[in-house]
Structure formats: structure tokens, C-alpha cells
Amino acid sequence: MFLSAVPQPIESIFPALGSVAGLKVNELSTPKDCYDLAFPLSKGKVGTVEQWDLGALGPEVEVVIRITRQKVYWLFPSFNLPFPTNIDTQVILLKLKNGQIAVLLPSTTSSYMGGFRGSSNESIVVRFERDSATEKAGATFGKVAVAFGAELRDVVAKVVLAARSIDSPASESGVQVKPYAEEKTIFSETLTYCTWNSLQPPIGATSTNALAALDSFAKNGIRPYSFLIDDAWQDTKNFRLQSFGCMPSFLDGLSDLGVLVKGAKEDFGVKQVGVWHTIQGYWCGVEPSKFIDKYKLVKVVKDGYPGPFEPEGYEYYIPHPDDVGRFFDDYYSIVASYGVSFTKVDNMASLDNLVSARTVLGLEPAESLGPAVPIPSLRTAYKGAIKAAAEKHFGSSESGRVIWCMGMTPRMILGAQVGEGSGPRSVLRNSDDYYPNEPDSHRYHIFINVVNAMFTSQLNLVPDLDMFQSHPYIRPQGEANETHTPLQSDIYPQAAFHAALRSLGAGPVTITDVPGKTDPAILNKLVGASKTGGTVALQASSSPFTSNDVFDPALLQGGSGRALRVFSKAAHGGGLLGYWNIRSEDGKVEDEVAIADVLHVAEQGSTQTSGVVLFSQKTKEVRIVHAVEAGGAVAPKLLVELGAFEFELVTVAPILSSAGVEVAVLGLVDKYNTLAGLASPGEVKDGALEVAVKSAGELAIWIGGLKEGSPPRVTVDGEEGKVTVKACETGSLLIVALEVSAKTDGNFVLRVTL
């Protein structure tokens, strides 16, 4: 039921909203504190844009973060006002003066694409671009979901649920994506090697160098489970696809792609190999003369939305919607015959910035064009064709069998996605690229991924935080000829800066090291070894998130101040508190761990009962928190002091009690994500602690009240464990060395007699 007037919470955001003609407002019964703003669309054809001026933000709005498509294919969170007038903002995050958080999300359906833009008078407009014709005015409404609440992470989840119920009312009481839900993919807890940055000049994109990279990992005791062959393997010329074969220079003497795939699997233990391509074949489509005899083609013209290298009005050729299914079926059939079992599909949003498409009737003696092709049919046909081909040849298109990349447009990630609350998730690249050659990009890369992941992880998607390198950037001219003044990226440890964040993500953990340059000191904190020596990526099972503290524009400015907070809930209780210095111009972080931070990852009620143990990876300090209040402080203080490119990770482990003895499993303290190594929650029974661990490493267990000179007995798989006891102010730390053993596979099983 629509309300007779704009309710006060909405009016506090947009005081002038009541004067918008035709606007209808509905308060949803579930989720609570959510609203549906409905704007009546006029009769119109495909491509028609209608917009409503919402006015300026009200004085009750304290801080704004807009998540804007600054490039046609990526979302960028920004504090900057006013809103841009020529590009779309997809999500608005607001902190109000009363302490509440509000989030606004315009819907995108098969009928229209919604978004926000600025206006010449610095107000905000909501606009809807028609993707299907409407014959009757008022028959279709453009919708905006609005949610309110106390915590940013929860309000983002609520606004997605609200949008889901608005667009698909029948799903309102159905299965829904839940905050902190497990995000499993074919890449979970494994390492992926990608060729992209790895084989840039001066190395060279060849199969020989790709195998050299796998050999380099193996020599360091690291075996990637997945091998992704990125751009430069295909048969292309002038940025157009020439055939379904390989570039001879990439094969480097091999007879075909299958020989490379076989070598990677047999010689280096790779289990699955994927290939990269763009959604239209290659960056500028296909060579028409090479494909027109087998597939119908269309000639498309791009618009001027920022991002692509090609200028406005650029023309190129791609498969016709009628034949794109057969095109990708044939392509995937060929690569699958070589042993390929997943793909990375790039440049997805290129289909979002087209102004025209016409059927190609012939090329000789002169090009002949036929009827126009509806552009919305291209978008749906292409994504559907890739999904169908992947399901046929790889067994699935979900859970990472297709990695969707450069596709953060609402037509790709909303629509059907926001209407789906269950089933396997798709993997989506979550940010603009990792740029090892741009020193100032690293801090913003962290910020983008953390903010975006709160949103994308609620869309039945698993955010992919992108690849990284474990070593300093190597320039195109090579190390031997470098006489330059060192860059920040040469000096500062950006590798650990990125590696630590990947440990808090649930998507693919992807390394793109130059052959022979891997830094095992970095990589071995991100991965571990199973009992039999297999490589295990020690990562979170759900996406990272941040808190209301992100509403601080100074986070990205210079000087001294607070850190970006990044939280991760552990699968078996507790979690990680992350603090990143993303300040500009060598700014410093001077901060401290707050009880409010702990509450984001501690199980509800646990800190009011047995409490938690905090362990600082940077300083090795231990703190005990027995009873907490939201505004309380950790005592004594646990300071967070960070220079440029530095971060801190603090483990939060629940305390277990038995017969007056308190114990907490801190996890593998030689790894970034200490708790990711646990295969089970610690359990105290019959006077002993039992815990299963999936990786070798240094397992730390805190024990309170341990009698001096009487260390407890520790067994690992029934045999005496190698234990070191370290005293700390609040008790003792038992460090148990877990080592690779070829005897059996499975988890390490520890028993500590208390």
C-alpha cells in the first residue's frame, strides 16, 4: 500500500521529494525500515530516458559515499560531491546526523536500467533508461529501494533484500542471501596462477614462460591448483579475433593449447586450467571476413561513456544474437577438448555502451548492412550464450566456471541477479585492475574492494579481489637496464599490502608473479601446506566488510589519522580485525583497537560470557576481553600505528572454559588469516582441548592460569607434539609446530590435556 505522504526518514534525505510529480512511496513489511520509491514511466520506446529531480540532500545528511560507474565497466566508491552529471551512480551510502545509516539502490530490470546522476543545480536526479517499449503511460514504475539501520554492513544487506522483494514480490519470504553466508567456488582454499602481469614485457607472453612461472612456484614448494591463461593467447590481429586457434608466438613451438594444458597438469600438479576472452571474442570483436561464412554478424557502434580505449562512434563486428550461442558453443567445445574447464570473460560492460547494431548482409564487393538489431537482445543473448556453453562443456557456469570481469554495470549484476536469493553464486571481479606500476593505486585498490564487496557479496556473487604479485614491480625495460630513481612501488612492501587483503576474501586467490621472482616470505603467509604437501590458500569463507567508521573522508587524505577497518568473520567462531593505512602522501595511521571493532566478528553473546582473546600479528601482544560494552575500550590499549603501505591484523578468538581453565585457539600465527587454517572449532571435553587444522604451520593456543613448569601434554595425530611455551601478561601461549608428513592425508588432529 502506498503512503499518502513522504515519510520523515525519506524526507530527511531529500526534503524536496514531496514535490516530485507522480511519486509513490511504499513502506515494506519486510525487511524492516525499508521503503520502495516508485516513479511512473511514460509511454516510450527502447532507449528512452526519463529522470526525476530529487533535489539536494538535506541538512540531516552528514557524510555521503557514492558508488559510481566512473568507467563503463567498474564501480568506484567516492566521497566527492556533487554527483557527476554524465556517469551513473549505482548505490548511495549515507551517514545521518542522528547516527543512522541509509542506503539507496535504484532497480534494474528487463524493462529498464536505473541510476543516479547529478544535475546542473547540484541536486540529484534518478533516471531510468528503457530496455523494453511501454505502450501505456504509468504501466511501469521505475523503483528505488531505500533502507535504514544502525550498521552499514547490515543496511547494505537490507537494501538488496528490499530491492529483491520490490522486483520479485514472490521471493519476499523465500530463501535469501544472508550476510556473512559462506561463499564457495571452484577456487575456494586453493591458489590460482594467472599469466597477465606475469608475462608482461620484458618477459613475453609465451607458453614457455608460463610453464617457467609454474616451475618457479614448484621450486618454492608452492603448487597452484588452477592455471588461468589470460590475454595474449588467442589468434588476433588489430585487436580482432581471427580464429578459434592460438597465437603462434604464444604457443612458442607447441603444436596446440592442449600440450600446454597437459604439461601444466602432469608436470606441476595443476588441477584445472582456464582461458580468458572478452564477451565479444576479443577487444574489438571479430574479423568479419574470417567469420561471416559460418556465423551471422552485426556491426555495432559505441557511445561516449568514459572508460574504453576506443573513441565515441567506433565501429566493430560481433556475432549476431541469433548465432552467438553457436559461436560460443563451438569455441568452448574446442578449448574443452584441450582440457580447459573454466573461462574468464572480460569487457562485459562493452555491450552496455552501444548506440546501434545492424545485421551484416555481406562484405563484398562492398559492405551491405541490413535491419537494426535491438541492443537489449545483444546483452541478454551474449550472457545467456556463455552460460549455456559453459554448462555444456564445463559442467556449470556458476561457482567460478565463468569469472565475469569488467562487468559492474547494473544490467549485468542486478536484474535477474538481485532477484535470486539462493543457488550457486557467480564469481565477479570486484574492482578496477591491480596496477603494480602505479604506486598510488594500491591504497585505493584496497578501499574499492572492501566497500564494493559489501554490496556485490549480497547479489548472489562472490567478489574477486583481483590478482597481485608477491614481488616489487619489474619495468618493461627489465631489471638489468634500470637506471631510474626508485618508485614507491620499488621501495614499499605493496605485495604484503595486497596479499593480506586476499586472505580476508572468499573469491579466487590469484598470483601473477614474474617467473623466478616469487617472494616465498610473502606467499607462504597466504598459503599453507597440507599433510601431504599440497598448497592450501588460507582465506576467509565469506567476503570482508567494514563499519560505519568508513564514513570518514580523511581516510584517503594525508597526515595522521585513523585506519580503514576491514573485518572478516571466521567459519568456526571469532574472526579477523584488519587495519589498513590508505592515507595519501605517506600519511600515518595512529589508531587503536576498539571494543566496537571486536563486536563485528565476535559471536553474539560470546563477549558477555567467556570472552575473547585478541592477538596482534604486528606486535605479538595479547589482550583478554571478558565483558564488553559497545563504547568500551580494550585495556590496556592495543595501539595501531602504521606507516605507508602497512597494515595490521588482529585475531579475535573465543575463550573456551573447562574446570576453571580458560583456553582459546588463535590459529596459525605465521599466516595472515590465522583462523582460516582451522578445520573445526576448538572443543573442550573430558579435560582436554581438541581441534582439527587443515595446514602445516605454527598453531598458537592461549591458556589462562597455566601453572609454571607444568606445560600440558600435546599430541598431534596421536603422537607427541613439538611445543614451545611463551609467557604473556594474561597467561601462556603454546606454539605447536605442525609439519608436512607424507604418512596420511586429511587434517592435523590436536589434543591438549588441560
Image (spheres, helix red, strand yellow):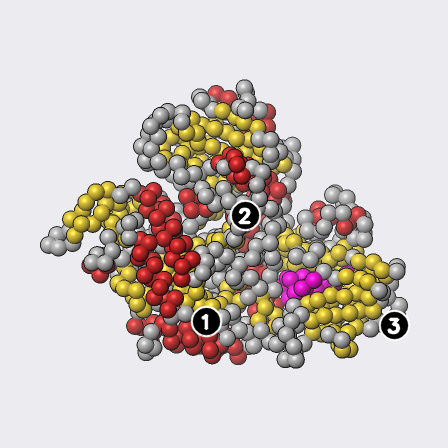
Q: Secondary structure at mark 2?
A: loop
Of 554 and 737, the residue lying toward us: 737
Badge 2 crowding class, 10 Å Cα cut-off, few under 14, some 14 to 19, many 20 or more, is few
Cα separation between marks 2 and 3: 51 Å
Q: Residue at label 2?
A: 422
Left or right of 632, for residue 211: left
Q: Can the viewer see residue 148?
A: no
Amino acid at pointer 3: Ser
Q: Which residue is drawn at the image coordinates 60% and 51% (left, top)? A: 181
Q: Can the viewer see residue 507?
A: yes
Q: Which residue is drawn at the image coordinates 74% and 70% (left, top)? A: 750
In what quadrant of the picture does the N terminus appear? top right
Amino acid at pointer 2: Ser
**Magenta range:** 664-680
Cα separation between marks 2 and 1: 39 Å
Q: Residue at label 3?
A: 710
Amino acid at pointer 1: Val
Badge 1 crowding class, 10 Å Cα cut-off, few under 14, some 14 to 19, many 20 or more, is many
Camera-near label (3 vs 1) is: 3
Of 737 and 493, the residue lying toward us: 737
Camera-near label (2 vs 3) is: 2
Which numbered disc, 3 or 1, marks the residue that appears first in the sequence?
1
Residue 220 x, y percent position in the rendering: 55, 77
Left or right of 439, for residue 481: left
Q: Residue at label 1?
A: 514
Camera-near label (2 vs 1) is: 2
Residue 300 x, y percent position in the rendering: 26, 47
Q: Secondary structure at mark 3?
A: loop
Residue 676 belongs to the span the image colors magenta: yes
Cα separation between marks 3 and 1: 49 Å
Disc 2 vs disc 3: Cβ atoms closer than 8 Å? no
